[in-house]
Image (cartoon, grey):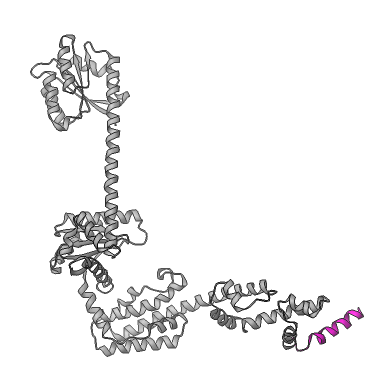
Amino acid sequence: MALKVLVVDDEKLERVLIQKIYDWGAHGFEVIGDVSSGAEGLEFIKNRQPDIIITDINMPNMDGLEFVEKVFQQKEYQGIRIIIITGYREFDYARRAVKLGVDDFLLKPIDGKELAKIAEEIKGEIEQERKKTEEVTMLKEKVTQNEDIVIESFLQRLVENRIEEEEGIHRLQMYQFDSVLEGCICGNIQLDYGKTMSEEQKEWYGKSVIELVHQLDVGEVFSFMHYLGNIILYFKESDVTKLVDPCKRLIGEIMSQLSIRVTIGISKSHSGYDGIQSAYQESLKALSTFIFLGRNRCLFYSDYESIEQRNHDMKDIDWEDFVFSVQNCLVDKVNDYIDEYIKNIYDTGSTNMLWLKYMALNLLIKAESTLHKTGKNLSEIEHISASADLVEPIDSIPSMKRILKEHVNTIMKYNDSIRTTKGRQVIKQALDSIEKNLYNPDLCLKLVASEIYVNESYLSRIFKQEVGESLIGYITRKRIEESIRLLNTTDLKVYEIAERVGIKDPHYFSICFKKQVGVTIKEYRKPIHIENKEK
């Protein structure tokens, strides 16, 4: 950026000469004005501040020295650099001007080279000063950012109870957040970032929300952005009802200014060190009720409590066995569990639709947990809707029963297809392992299972299902088939063939051979020898 220059001289020719004698534009300067008196100079710099002033010392009304003094009396002008133009007779005045803080002076008649030299020197000094200022500013910003990061990290550990009480209280006092110990309510702001938003964009939204929080009159509050993306607020307040209107206003401002969906979970009032963590946990639970109550609103912990109370009043089912049955596609058993679950809900006599949806969601989440074992997210699986979307149309117990059975059966079909595909892959790996280790006398179910990293009982079960015989029976059959090949093509002794096919005991080998082939090794080999002699 060009340095701005103002020329102050009562003689027009001198002002023109100064502008013509040096190619200002080519050397990084811009002459932004020329005036004929010190008074005009002071008026000019009120509207447009120059970086450098070149002024004559001898002017009527307000001479150059008085002009310089008035410039430097203003704090905001103290960074302006000044060059004095003087004749030999005013040399003593010029020296006084230098003491005032003038950077340099030029003797009349003005020499273009001398002017250029002084201008370049001042330019270098200004650029050096600006560079230092930028470095200091950047350093201050970095220190501030680092301090903010340290505070944010502390607050995150604090709300998750990952910091000792003594240290936590000390640092709350140090950061002047200790007023929350007297009583606070936690607000948990969840923004609907969507799936494609970058981390940088999320951070920008988070900071923008925090700015809005402090712009609005929501009382005494401190805030920070959680690493999970939510913005956490701690209100110095003991009455939850007083936060309803401020939070509604905040939601309105966020939606209006940032065009993003937002939900706020509000805890009950708590005090003391443990209350900080309790309030945070309650705000998370309050947020979870958005599934029933919707987004773009304040959700309160009391909503969550009413749902949980009904949940405690209901008989439960064997969830572990239910999940196992869904995982293993035991359709009849799963449907029986759903019938039992619906009956238990019916027996409570509840007509609260919010609670019915919650209970439906509870079962669906359990069923969907089996999908995680496939390595897939729910959103990646075709034809399977998110459970939160499914419970929305529930308006009666019959509709609840229908939706639960339809969705859980869809999950079981998917699990079955994955299990079949996975089972085939496991069988292929097992067969490859057997072929590779057929001659190893230690080959057994345990060795194969460990080599392909699966459970022994699982391998034994699916091997029998897919291959039609036990894994040990298959190994024995393949060994006998290989021994027949060796009997047909070699003159190896029986014990040598047994060793070649991985059976240490020749007697056991003979038993296995007769059991599978129907004749003894000797009886099998006799026709072969006769045939070979005839040839």
The answer to if 22 sits in the magenta stretch is no
Range of magenta residues: 517-535
The quadrant where residue 4 appears: top left
Tell me, yes or no, if residue 230 can be seen here.
Answer: no
Rendered residue at 20%/62% (across/down): 234
User: Relative to 195, is 301 on the left or the right?
Assistant: left
The answer to if 518 sits in the magenta stretch is yes
Rendered residue at 24%/61% (across/down): 166
Rendered residue at 22%/22% (across/down): 103
Q: Is residue 166 above or below residue 290?
A: above
The quadrant where residue 268 appears: bottom left
Choose between 193 and 135: the one closer to the eye.
135
Where residue 14 sits in the image (x, y, percent)?
20, 15
User: Relative to 407, is 488 on the left or the right?
Assistant: right
Choose between 266 and 453: the one closer to the eye.
453
The quadrant where residue 199 appears: bottom left
